[in-house]
Image (tube, coloured by chain):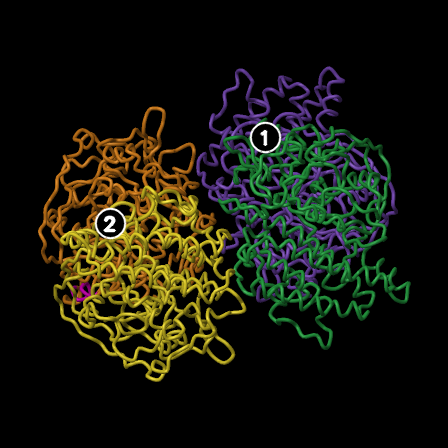
Chain colours: A orange, B yellow, C purple, D green
Amino acid sequence: MNTKAYQAAVSDSSSVSTSALQAISQRFSAIRSLSLRITEPLSAEDCVIQSMPDVSPIRWHLAHTTWFFETFLLTGISDYRPFNAQYEYLFNSYYNTVGKQFPRHQRGLLSRPGLDEIIDYRLHVDAQLGHMLDEDLLDANALHILEIGLQHEQQHQELMLTDIKHVLSCNPLLPAYSPTQRQTSESHSLLGAIPLEWTECDEQIVNIGHDGNGFAFDNEGPRHRALLQKHSIATRCVTNAEFLEFVEDGGYQRPELWLSLGWDLVCREEWRSPLYWLRGNDGWQEFTLAGLQPLSAAQPVSHVSYFEADAFARWAGKRLPTEYEWEYAAQNSVQPGQRQEGVFADHLMDNGEAVQPQPQAKEEWLGNVWQWTSSDYSAYPGFEAEEGALGEYNGKFMCNQYVLRGGSCATSSTHIRTTYRNFFPPQARWQFSGIRLAD
Amino acid sequence: MNTKAYQAAVSDSSSVSTSALQAISQRFSAIRSLSLRITEPLSAEDCVIQSMPDVSPIRWHLAHTTWFFETFLLTGISDYRPFNAQYEYLFNSYYNTVGKQFPRHQRGLLSRPGLDEIIDYRLHVDAQLGHMLDEDLLDANALHILEIGLQHEQQHQELMLTDIKHVLSCNPLLPAYSPTQRQTSESHSLLGAIPLEWTECDEQIVNIGHDGNGFAFDNEGPRHRALLQKHSIATRCVTNAEFLEFVEDGGYQRPELWLSLGWDLVCREEWRSPLYWLRGNDGWQEFTLAGLQPLSAAQPVSHVSYFEADAFARWAGKRLPTEYEWEYAAQNSVQPGQRQEGVFADHLMDNGEAVQPQPQAKEEWLGNVWQWTSSDYSAYPGFEAEEGALGEYNGKFMCNQYVLRGGSCATSSTHIRTTYRNFFPPQARWQFSGIRLAD
Amino acid sequence: MNTKAYQAAVSDSSSVSTSALQAISQRFSAIRSLSLRITEPLSAEDCVIQSMPDVSPIRWHLAHTTWFFETFLLTGISDYRPFNAQYEYLFNSYYNTVGKQFPRHQRGLLSRPGLDEIIDYRLHVDAQLGHMLDEDLLDANALHILEIGLQHEQQHQELMLTDIKHVLSCNPLLPAYSPTQRQTSESHSLLGAIPLEWTECDEQIVNIGHDGNGFAFDNEGPRHRALLQKHSIATRCVTNAEFLEFVEDGGYQRPELWLSLGWDLVCREEWRSPLYWLRGNDGWQEFTLAGLQPLSAAQPVSHVSYFEADAFARWAGKRLPTEYEWEYAAQNSVQPGQRQEGVFADHLMDNGEAVQPQPQAKEEWLGNVWQWTSSDYSAYPGFEAEEGALGEYNGKFMCNQYVLRGGSCATSSTHIRTTYRNFFPPQARWQFSGIRLAD
Amino acid sequence: MNTKAYQAAVSDSSSVSTSALQAISQRFSAIRSLSLRITEPLSAEDCVIQSMPDVSPIRWHLAHTTWFFETFLLTGISDYRPFNAQYEYLFNSYYNTVGKQFPRHQRGLLSRPGLDEIIDYRLHVDAQLGHMLDEDLLDANALHILEIGLQHEQQHQELMLTDIKHVLSCNPLLPAYSPTQRQTSESHSLLGAIPLEWTECDEQIVNIGHDGNGFAFDNEGPRHRALLQKHSIATRCVTNAEFLEFVEDGGYQRPELWLSLGWDLVCREEWRSPLYWLRGNDGWQEFTLAGLQPLSAAQPVSHVSYFEADAFARWAGKRLPTEYEWEYAAQNSVQPGQRQEGVFADHLMDNGEAVQPQPQAKEEWLGNVWQWTSSDYSAYPGFEAEEGALGEYNGKFMCNQYVLRGGSCATSSTHIRTTYRNFFPPQARWQFSGIRLAD
């Protein structure tokens, strides 16, 4: 739900019901604690490193998500005493409206505040917000911001997992994030992937975008009519086995398969496979959060850039779907409001399994791997950003990025929906990003 | 017309008529000689410099356009003797299918072959092609390639003008490209710009893309149905006077007006105005091909990046049009097939006027300044690239670029049409690129 | 003592005496434990960061010094079991003879092994060496290498202090390394600096370099005759107050005072004062290991580059001494073999004082601040590097570096001598480097 | 002769004699015209390019040498009308005392003024100075500056030759600077190189530096006493054949032979041979000013950096001489004041021979190739820079450079002497720089 729809919905009733408040309170508590669970297998040292500018230290994620609640809900309250006045500057990511920011690429230069102090900071803010929830001191707008803060924290939880994976991959020791997690549950590994099939769709006008029931980010709306061309779309994602064919067919050596910018990158960075693949003496392996593993043929390929996704599609004689084609197909397959089954971070962690894609044993649209679309990330017709500083959340990034859909094994099941628009620059590949084909 | 349509059209008739051949021959001769006319005011030294990676030396343009004809029409003919076998490598721009290329950013390191030798190269290739045209030795496919070669040379003529402007602007002497050209014709300067008005359009399905009558690049097709949202679009472009208001209102100091990547660039490059504006003691001036001139209030603003166009639109409470909105509006205003009136390079040069935008005294869609659209440069549904090496012409650049429409004062009147899709990265501003607003 | 002299000395006696062995054993234990004492005030997070390529993480210093003993004394012993076989690669600094090295500028990317594991590594190697010392299993050559290892560790102890100072200075919180240490002892602060006087010296032939009594690095020899010009040299170093005059006289704005490379750097990096000076509302402050402090007028200036030292000397109408002039003057003032009084890291830490320069209340040649000389770092006539991998210790760095003499407040008193040659590139200023003038 | 000695000498006599003036006038005319002779084989395009920051366009050299005379002799004369007031800025190289400078690395961005206009500029200044020489209007100080200007122009003539060689080498066509010049005179090529012998020298005190008879740059003085160690020095330079042995012995693959900074460079730049060597199908070739030539075994190796010279010496079990050792040996072999026989630019050009090293058929100290010494470029004891802006000529570059002695085939015979100190950074290799060994 975007701001306006949400406010309308809430202000219809004179107050939020007690049971709704309890639900919010539980959700707040559950999401906040998941961040600490993600941190648990890590040492204090692990939480310091910024292995590339795109990556942030784990400690920074823990602090910044807290800063978000503090800045947008607590600062300005007359009797609120900030935990540390300098954090406003240190942990602001990109909100020019709030103030200057410590330079992003220097986040790895900070050893203080340490992990313990940042956990204290979290407790300080949680206590304050818990009190306000208990005492029903948050109005509708504040509850809306609280919800954005929780969604925001869920986004950072995914980044924590992909960032620490990148950090650990830079270490020649190739340490596991959590060696005790099971790599693949039996239920998944035994089944293998379903055959690749195609769903056809005729030209038609469809409704795209969020309908206002439940939370949504501003960039998911407004819902609007769009014309789809006749096309077909795959029922599952490309597997490691299929991508390996591309690799072995010289896919990374043939310029005619690549966008020009992609080919420059392949040459300059000497890309020869997806990000975490390693060719060993005994064949291909993949670095995972559970350490180095043999490459799983049936798993969907992940950690590919838009350039690789696009080149693979051209090699296969297909193309990537538009985000509208993807959303329409997903709408027809996913029941909104139902609990999502599938491969999600929260489920995997609850089961003691490593956060890693799993073979798609049935048609699946949400979870497992993000799917690159051919759509650049731009505003829907009539788009209006959130008001105030939160308007910087999405809109200002609508340039030179491509939309990914569907969520991944590092996404929480309560965070994703068919209208959700993720976005990354075409060269990014440290996310669990994969490929679904269209024709 | 894309390749397939063109070939179909030509092969309907068993041969091209004599008068058609004469017309092609005249057109070939006229376009080839315009490149030399553009070079005429320049010294041999002017033709060497590559002032930034995007710019190519004038000599390189003269050679590369010739290489294009040689490579795609002459090489492979049994008795054709290449002018210099090493030119294949030296003057290949980006055709991997043809072979390796001398690195683009090093084009300014070549002093040989000199200007005279390159003109000899042109004469060599022109003589050969003239002979083949006279003797009717070119089949339909060859004539199609010849036409692409001419369109290609017209594109480079525009680049020659914008590149030499950039080269000269790097010299503290600020020399004029041609001090003898009149800066502005009286007919233009006296009229001023028309008032800014808006053309409204309801939601509707329209046809977008080239219909196959006459030449078109592959990226202009296929023609397809698209849904326009209700909107309105301006009848003329933003003027220097209007853009100056933005500058003076702190437009370049307010992050909330900018896309995030644009703001980074504004800070890093210390942008404070469009590319060639200079603030002197007596007010704003603009570097033009006729040297430094007082800023003309009524001229459309040019040499702005996509970032500046987008920020201006946000400041004005408007937005940039999509390329579909632009094309639909232009179709309703421009009669296809008619000689284009307006501000074009060939007309200006025939009149002895400097190549420079002119005040828009009437509703104009073609010529004067390119207009940034909000559309990223991507394939139309069902797009198929030209076959062979010429397939590298357009498709592989469909990433991180934005579409500009309409042509400019540096475009030839015989080169532009309403379906024409130009494209540049969002930071580019050395083209005559301006702003048309939508709402 | 260089290798050959040392080996000769040791092999004269059939074995090292028991008391000598005990002394070595105590010295080994004392030096190894000082590294841990330096680490003690730091968090695990502090020990991860590499704030610039010149800096290494504290954990890396702890491991590399241990690697040195392991590689040169334990590896190759038949029954030695390495702590971790991959450490050979991870903690090799620059010994090509030993093998490949993990890239220096990426040392900050490693979170594992963690601090605890590295301390275990230290204990593992210490136990092994302790056993060998106890059992008298080290021959003369091994004892020589052990001594180099200890001297090497003392060098890294100085770097640990200067590196962590740099790391902490990058944090806007400006945290103190150890807030509990006293900033300045009373005995020092009350006295102030002695007046600046000059020691004269006529032209003469002198002996320069180490005479072979006691340990010396290879680069300190061979001792040789050299011709000194007539000159004079200052009895103390330049103070902060004196350097402040230079700053306030526009020293950083006047190109005529600077070497050309230095002036480029001043402009590019916008240097306006020594590295850790900060101009606050209440005057100049200096970031120290005890946190931000008011600038002490009487302390010798430190954290200046060769460029700043040279520019200051030119501004003062003087010059920097040659390393030969420095060594000759120091020889006449310092009694070799005596316990060094003065401002040294070990003494300061024993006294609970912060590692920070102190006013020079008497003529002092060793301790407090390193003194830039005008001599480039090059081989003495007849120089021979150590044999084997240890030959890479010094000689290969003899290019584009300048010699510093005398040791600093971060040097151990048992590590320094008048023949000691330290060296850094002319732009380096994160060491405690100061200025002594000559004329 | 440094400034002070020169002024003293001139002011002894109340005026310069008529015959001396005529000699100066002829010398002025000869040197100025040589710059144009060097330019003669070049096209206007050749004179534009700056192929790396160290290189300047030929047109820039022609203008800057003229600017030198104009700035230091004509500007300030009441009735002098500058050719173009903006040239003061455009053609100032590095004299901060004179004013701001157009950025060095952007010299290749200037196409105007063109070659013809710069030649007019030369004629304008030459006419003015010719008039002043004819009318005896230059006082002793002005004549001293005139002499510096001529020496300065001779330095730039050498740079013109080495810079255009670099420019042409960047072109895959590998064009010759002058294909009509003979590559090697018979007299040279038939003889081959003399055997490598060694001149021994005992420890002794010698006089180093210029004695004040005739012109010298400030950095050659003051003459002073220095102590030489016992040593020996080679009678000729290292040949291509000898250097090829180093190459084929894996010299560029063995880190133990290299200074650390040199090894970094070898790896980063993938150096495998001297700068202009190319390995073809038929063996090694060398790019020369006469185009690509088979590598001459007997010629002295040239275009090696200090790093390569030092690595070769280490491989050969020798070392580079100090500049004092070199000067003392050369003094004993060269008669001062005599016309220099040997391989010099002016002689070669007079003979129609290409500027290229020749086999050393006899003991030679001047000409052919510059010889790297192990001495960093620093001030002699008691050094005083020229007064005023000319004080920026030498002194401010005394950092991170090494001294080369002896001149090269690109030096004029009237420019060189045994006390002459040339200097370049250790990585530079586009000069005719070679190797003489010492032991």
Residue C197 versus residue C373: which sits nearer the camera? C373
For disc 1, the chain is D
Mark pair 1, 2: CA separation = 50 Å
Few, some or many C-alpha atoms within 10 Å of disc 1 (few <14, some 14-19, many ≥20)? Answer: some
Where the C terminus of chain B falls, by quadrant? Answer: bottom left
Disc 2: CA contacts within 10 A as few (<14), some (14-19) or many (>=20) = some
Q: Is residue C411 visible?
A: no
Image location (x, y in percent) of residue B93: 38, 50
Residue found 24% across the figure and 75% down from its top: B235
Residue drawn at x 86%, y 36% as measured from the top left: D204
In this view of the protein, which residue sits in the foreground, D83 or C410? D83
User: What chain does badge 2 belong to?
Assistant: B
Front residue of this view, candidates B276 and D259: B276
Identify which amino acid the numbered label 2 is placed on.
Answer: Glu
Image x and y of residue A410, in percent: 27, 43
One can see residue C252 in this view: yes
Which element type, helix, strand or loop, lies under badge 1? Answer: helix
The magenta region covers A4-9
Please indicate whether residue D10 sits to the left or right of residue D409 in the image.
Answer: right
**Residue A207: image x %, image y %?**
12, 58
* Local secondary structure at mark 2: loop
Q: Residue furthest front?
A: B135
Drawn side of residue A254 relative to residue C430, left or right: left
* Label disc, if present, on residue D247 of the rendered structure: 1
> At which x and y percent is residue C125?
54, 26
Name the residue beneath numbered marker 2.
Answer: B386
**In front of the other: label 1 or label 2?**
2
**Position of residue D251 in the picture relative to residue A275 (left or right):** right
